[in-house]
């Protein structure tokens, strides 16, 4: 089966940089995704890594190391609106089944 | 361009009842996946529909069933409801091409409470 581990909670200061790590165990790995979910809202897609390296999208960057089964999400210039839960998710298997981690609750403080 | 829409937004049922949840995918998407999200947890994969067939399934009992219509919309049915079925049910749409960048677009969900 698949398993993912990520920290349950992270607190960071507005304007700072925060990194959320994710380690995974899976067979038939295709890629690692990151989703943001505000309280009471739907998960929204942030990034996807299929190959090793860094992907940058504005203030958000995501990194993947396939050999280490490890990835992270980097959020720069933190804003109060970034307070949310962040989920890593692996796509695996023939039809890219998506398995989500338990989520990291990020609190941005002034 | 309408995103993923789900109905109803909230639902209250009693144990033993049956429920049907509905989902319309994002325009141009042909694949619908259903997830169950308990409070404080990540979404758990229930099953995925593509070309009106269940293409893959997570670890959920047969009480959970679904359907996809020719217009790609989908229903999730849950029979013999248990208290533990209380959760947020999320529908996500995507493109079914296996090699496509697997981006899931989620609806706002249906909050099911079983009393």
Image: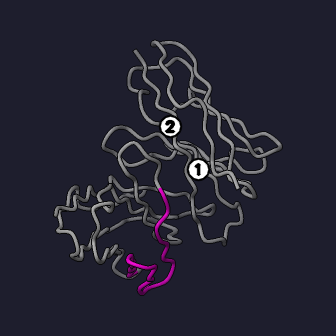
Residue closest to the eye, A19 or A83:
A83
Question: Looking at the image, which residue is at 60% across and 48% down?
Answer: B33
Q: Would you call the spot at circle 2 few (<14 residues within 10 Å), some (14-19), or many (20 or more)?
A: many
**Picture layout, residue A20 above or below residue B57:** below
Q: Which residue lies furthest to the bottom in this view?
A: A53
Distance of label 1 from label 2 (alpha carbons): 10 Å
Residue closest to the eye, A27 or B44:
B44
Residue B47 percent across, percent down from the top left: 59, 44
State left or right for residue A20 relative to residue A99: left
Question: Looking at the image, which residue is at 37% across and 51% down?
Answer: A38
**Picture layout, residue B23 above or below residue A44:** above
Q: Quadrant of residue B75?
A: top right
Of helix, strand and loop, which mostly describes the magenta segment? strand
Task: Check if residue A60 falls in the magenta segment.
Answer: yes
Residue A64 disc label: none
| Residue hosting label 1 | B92
The disc numbered 1 marks a residue on which chain? B
Question: Looking at the image, which residue is at 83% across and 43% down?
Answer: B70
Question: Looking at the image, which residue is at 66% across and 72% down?
Answer: B99
């Amino acid at each position: 089966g698949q398993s993912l581990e990520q920290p349950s909670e992270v607190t960071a200061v507005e304007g700072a940089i925060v990194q959320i790590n994710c380690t995974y165990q899976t067979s038939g790995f295709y890629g690692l995704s990151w989703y943001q979910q505000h309280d009471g809202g739907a998960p929204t897609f942030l990034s996807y890594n299929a190959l090793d390296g860094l992907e940058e999208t504005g203030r958000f960057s995501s990194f993947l190391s396939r050999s280490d089964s490890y990835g992270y999400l980097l959020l720069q210039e933190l804003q109060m609106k970034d307070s949310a839960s962040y989920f890593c998710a692996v796509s695996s298997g023939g039809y890219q089944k998506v398995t989500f981690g338990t989520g990291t609750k990020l609190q941005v403080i002034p | 361009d309408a995103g993923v829409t789900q109905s109803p937004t909230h639902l209250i049922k009693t144990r033993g009842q049956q429920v049907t949840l509905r989902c319309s995918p994002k325009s141009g998407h042909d694949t619908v996946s259903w997830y169950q999200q308990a409070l404080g947890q990540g979404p758990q994969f229930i099953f995925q529909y593509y070309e009106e067939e269940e293409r893959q399934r997570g670890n959920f009992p047969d009480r959970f069933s679904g359907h996809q219509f020719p217009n790609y919309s989908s229903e999730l049915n849950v029979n013999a409801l248990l208290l533990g079925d209380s959760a947020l049910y999320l529908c996500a749409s995507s493109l079914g091409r296996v090699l496509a960048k697997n981006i899931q677009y989620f609806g706002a969900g249906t909050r099911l409470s079983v009393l």
